[in-house]
Image (tube, grey):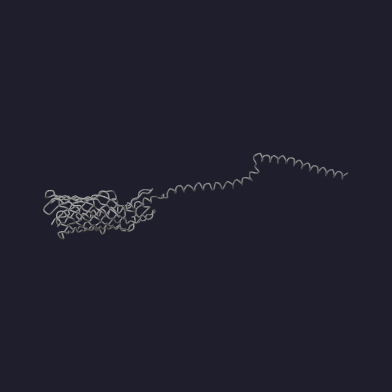
Amino acid sequence: MEVFNVRRFMLASVLTVVAAFALIAVEARPAAAATICESECGGPTPTPAPSYSPSPTPTYSPSPSPSPTPSSSPSPYPSSSPSPTPTPTGADSSGSSIGVLANQRFNQMITNRVLGTVLLGVNEQINCNNCVSAFGSAGSFSAGIHGRKELTNNLSLLAGIAYTQYSEGGYNITSAPIAAFALRYDFTDWGSSRPFFDVGTILTPWEKARYTRSYNTNLGPVNVTSSTNASNYAVYGRAGWMSRVSPRDEVAASIEVWQLWQRVSGYTDSAVAFNPFDASIATGTDRTSLVKIGGQWTHLYGSNIEANINGGWVQSFASHSGIVATVTGDGMVVPTMGNQGWFEYGGRLGFRVQKGWIVDLFANGTLGPQPVGNTIHGGVGLRINY
């Protein structure tokens, strides 16, 4: 009986434990189901939140750190980008200015010759007494002395020397001594109407020269004035016919042939604040040949006033520029000088203040297109006949 009771007690205990486990399982399943439902429906999930909170932190923390870097890095670059100077343009304009420089040097040759002819008596009659004249002129400053001396009844020496300064069209010449010499053969034994011949030279062995070169760039104009040394030489021959048409009048017509040379020492552009396309000019010799056909008339008014007018047409040929320039951005530039034609004129008004003493007012110049242009050189002189 006791055995039966023990068995019944053990069976009851086992059933009790099984029932308890069954009850716990039933209660746990709804809780798990509720948890799963809440996570799928987007409800609060306090338990998974700690598991996902670390993942957003490393995911988004790098994105803010690079964002200030791009925002701060562009700011210095735009502010510094306008500071570099824009690239200048204008090399072609700089190269073209070398042609203008060649024109200046051509004008220099012609002006030097015009001033030199004053020393050869261009404003005086063909045949006259021995004389000497001291003079000064403005327009182009010139001061000197010249005259003529009869060596024989037919042969005369014409000579003079002067100190000159002149400028025209962008160039300036200073400290330029000019000397001129010529021989004139006048066939006086032929009577009042006769031929005559001249041969002579004009020398300017040294002069200080300043040339201005201008060109345009996209950043503004550029003007450069450079200094160098130059020299001018000329030889000529003249054949003409003069006639004493009356005791008070002498007329003459002639043809002249000239050869001119001009030597200019090499130089580079002087230093200026802005000259992106600078130039270097090599030593060179300009040259040109001229033919002049002209005439003159000298007349005596009363016994105290005499007047002379002269003029002629001049044509250049075989002109050559000695410029060989190296221009930054444009390379080597060798300009050409075309042939030119112009008119030359002169005149003198003399007042005989007493016997053998004459005060002269005179002028000489050119009329024509550039590069010769329109020029005038006037002055006053005191001439003494002996």
Asked if residue 365 lies left or right of residue 323, the reply is left
| Percent of width and height locating residue 240 | 20, 54
Quadrant in the picture for the N terminus = top right
| Rendered-image quadrant of the C terminus | bottom left
Residue closest to the eye, 375 or 290: 290
**Towards the viewer: 253 or 305:** 253
Height in image: 127 above or below 39? below
Occupied quadrant, residue 19? top right
Quadrant of res 291: bottom left
Residue located farthest toward the right when viewing the structure as drawn: 1
Seen as rendered, the residue at the extreme bottom is: 151
| Along the line of sight, the residue nearer the viewer: 186 or 140 | 186
Q: How many marks?
A: 0
Residue 236 position in % (x across, y down): 24, 57
Q: Position of residue 196 (x, y in %)?
A: 19, 56
Q: Position of residue 114 (x, y in %)?
A: 23, 53
